[in-house]
Image (spheres, grey):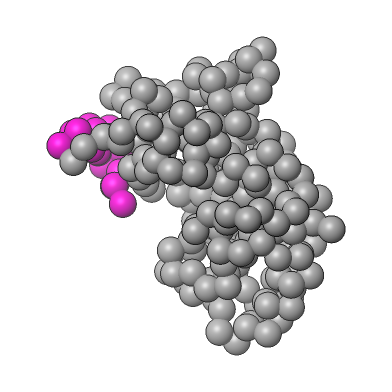
Amino acid sequence: MMRVGLLKTTLVNFPGRVAAAVFLPGCNLRCPFCHNAELAVSSIVSGPSEIPENVGAYVPLDSVYELLDKRKQVLGGLAISGGEPLLSPVLTDLIAYARSLGLAIKIDTNGTLPERLRSLISDKYTCPDMIALDVKTDPARYGELTTEKAAGQRVEQAIRESISILSTVEREGYPVRIEYRTVLVPGLVGMKELEVIASLLPANANWQLASFVPGNCLDPAWNNLQPYGPAETERLTAFARSLIPSATHR
C-alpha cells in the first residue's frame, strides 16, 4: 500500500493559506542534497524509522482523504509535493477530491515533465491555484542531478520548456500563482548559475532563494557541506535581485 508524507497543518507550504501538505513518493532526479531521500528513491514508501521533519508523518493515502474531509472547514488549501508529484498515478484523483471539498491546490514540481505540467494546467479540473517550480541550478548542469548522465541534455531541455510554459501562463493571465525557487547550494549555485537562471525567468518573476541546510541529505557526504555564510548569502541575493528585482531570500 502506498504511504505518503503528510503535514496535517502548515502555514509555510502554501503561502497565504492554512493548508495540509502531502508528499508523494517517486522522483526522476537524484539531487544529492535532497532531504526527502525515501520519497525520492521509491514509488511506495514503507514507513522509515526516521522521518524528515518537513514531511511530518508517513501515512496510508486513505488517511489523507480522511483528514481532508474531517478538516475541510479549517483548511484553505492542499500543497502537493514529493518526490516529484507529476510522476504519481494518484495525483489527479487527489486534486479532484481536494477540489470537491473546496480546497485550493498548490503543486511543487522539479520541472522535468513539461508535457504533464502543460496537461495539468490545460484541464480546468486539475489546474492548480499555485505552482512552485524548483530551478536547482543552470539547466546545463542537471546531468549532475540524474542517475543517467546521458539524460542530462534531455532534462535541460525539459527545464527550459517548463519555465516557458509557466511564463506563458503568467503572460496570458491564467488564474495561477507562479513561484520559482532556488536553493543556494555551494558548488552548484553561484553567481554564474544565478545569471543563467535569471535569463530564463520572466522579468517580474516571483523568485525565492533559500539557504542550503545540511543534514539528512540523500548523499550523506553532502551533510558535511558548509552553507554559504551570511555575507555571501546576501551578496548572492543582491546579485539575483539586480537581475530579477523581485528576487528575495527566505
Name the residue rendered at 77%, 49% in the picture: 44
- 191 or 44, nearer to the observer: 44
Query: In the picture shown, does residue 227 fall above or below 77?
Result: above
Location of residue 224 in the rendering, given as x and y in whole percent from the top left corner: 38, 32
Q: Is residue 165 magenta?
A: no
How many numbered marks does the figure carry?
Answer: 0
Residue furthest toward the top? 150
- 24 or 199, nearer to the observer: 24
Residue furthest toward the left? 231
- Residue 221 lies left or right of residue 249; in this view the side is right
Q: Is residue 246 magenta?
A: yes
Q: Is residue 201 visible?
A: no
In this picture, which residue range is highlighted in magenta?
231-250
- Residue 229 lies left or right of residue 112; in this view the side is left
Name the residue rendered at 68%, 77% in the picture: 67
Q: Which quadrant of the rendered structure holds the N terminus?
A: bottom right
Location of residue 6 in the rendering, given as x and y in whole percent from the top left corner: 62, 64
- 217 or 133, nearer to the observer: 217
Residue furthest toward the right? 1
Location of residue 119 in the rendering, given as x and y in whole percent from the top left corner: 73, 45
- Residue 193 lies left or right of residue 82; in this view the side is left
Query: In the picture shown, does residue 185 fall above or below 59?
Result: above
Query: In the picture shown, does residue 17 fall above or below 207?
Result: below
- 9 or 115, nearer to the observer: 9
Location of residue 69 in the rendering, given as x and y in whole percent from the top left corner: 71, 81
Name the residue rendered at 45%, 49% in the picture: 179
Name the residue rendered at 73%, 52% in the picture: 45
Q: Is residue 140 visible?
A: yes
Instruction: State whether the magenta stretch is mostly helix, strand or loop.
Output: helix
